[in-house]
């Protein structure tokens, strides 16, 4: 199994630009999660999907952030316009159905720097 | 609101010593996870604890869960340098209306050779 695949691994862009992060979950996993990790705030859940449907987006910081999951094998997290305070590592994770007692499997993350 | 507190947040210890990391949470939960993160790397699942009294061991690491006290511990026995990492606990409330997984802030463990 290839695991959760995220791209790009690193992204450096200027403030105001649109940023799109991509995630391919493990095949057969019903749940997909987007997290943001910073030194100050730790690991924060931004949004999660069940069977491609957003369930809880209460962690999305503001309207500049949006996430989609058009099919079971692909999700995007978009920031538009980006700001320096968005600099962080963004992780995608997936898991089987919620009562399977299985942990989340994390991707390698995207390290985002907004200049 | 569910809160998950880990302590200590930083720990520097000598090889060969034993120590315990604590994870307290503020409300009832269904499951508790422990993860390990190496610098610049992703999170790796260590343990899934499902019920009161659950104990799991892998090598020099042992995790336990006391749901009545709302406490989980991660015990390190005879620490070795390779265990240096950041350890996170995460509390899962999937069967509740406020279905969430909340992570602690992590314990950065540095083991001195």
Image (spheres, coloured by chain):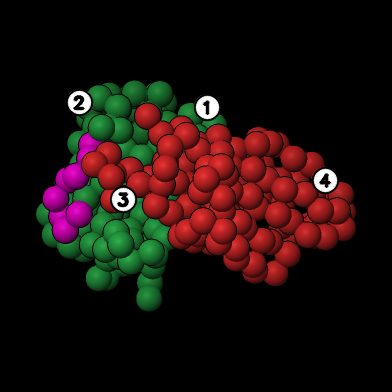
Residue A77 lies left or right of residue B61; in this view the side is left
- Residues marked 1 and 4, same chain: no
Highlighted magenta segment, given as a residue range: A50-57
Q: Which residue is mark 4?
A: B13
| Number of marks | 4
How far is disc 1 from disc 4 in space, using C-alphas?
Answer: 24 Å
Image point (25%, 70%), residue name: A28
List x then y, in percent, for residue B50. Answer: 46, 60
- Which chain appears red? B
Label 4 vs label 3, nearer the camera: 3
Image point (40%, 23%), residue name: A85
Mark 4 in CB contact with mark 2 (< 8 angstroms)? no
Q: Which residue is mark 2?
A: A63
How far is disc 3 from disc 1 in space, using C-alphas?
Answer: 27 Å
Q: Chain of mark 2?
A: A
Q: Chain of mark 3?
A: B
Palette colour of chain A: green
Give the prevailing secondary structure in the magenta stretch: strand
* Residue A77 shows in this picture: no
Q: Which residue is mark 1?
A: A40
Q: Earlier in the sequence, mark 1 or mark 2?
A: 1
How far is disc 2 from disc 3 in space, using C-alphas?
Answer: 26 Å
User: From the viewer's perspective, is residue A46 above or below residue B16?
Assistant: above
List x then y, in percent, for residue B77. Answer: 78, 60
User: From the viewer's perspective, is residue B69 above or below residue A94?
Assistant: above
Relative to the observer, which residue lies in front, A1 or A18?
A1
Relative to the observer, which residue lies in front, A56 or B57?
B57
Image point (39%, 64%), residue name: A102
Label 3 vs label 1, nearer the camera: 3
Q: Which residue is mark 3?
A: B94
Residue A9 lies left or right of residue B83; in this view the side is left
Label 2 vs label 3, nearer the camera: 3
């Amino acid at each position: 199994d290839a695991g959760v695949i995220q791209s790009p691994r690193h992204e450096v862009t200027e403030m105001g630009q649109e940023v799109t992060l991509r995630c391919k979950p493990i095949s057969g996993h019903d749940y997909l999660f987007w997290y943001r990790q910073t030194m100050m705030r730790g690991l924060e859940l931004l949004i999660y999907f069940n069977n491609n449907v957003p369930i809880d987006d209460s962690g999305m910081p503001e309207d500049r952030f949006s996430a989609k999951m058009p099919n079971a094998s692909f999700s995007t997290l978009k920031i538009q316009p980006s700001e320096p305070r968005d600099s962080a590592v963004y992780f995608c994770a997936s898991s089987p159905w919620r009562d399977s007692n299985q942990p989340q499997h994390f991707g390698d993350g995207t390290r985002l720097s907004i200049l | 609101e569910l809160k998950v507190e880990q302590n200590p947040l930083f720990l520097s210890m000598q090889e060969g010593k034993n120590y315990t990391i604590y994870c307290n949470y503020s409300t009832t939960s269904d499951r508790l996870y422990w993860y390990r993160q190496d610098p610049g790397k992703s999170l790796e699942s260590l343990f899934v604890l499902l019920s009161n009294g659950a104990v799991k061991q892998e090598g020099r690491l042992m995790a336990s869960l006391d749901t009545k006290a709302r406490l989980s511990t991660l015990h390190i026995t005879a620490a070795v340098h390779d265990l240096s990492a950041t350890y996170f606990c995460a509390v899962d409330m999937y069967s509740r209306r406020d279905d969430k997984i909340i992570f602690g802030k992590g314990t950065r463990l540095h083991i001195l050779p």
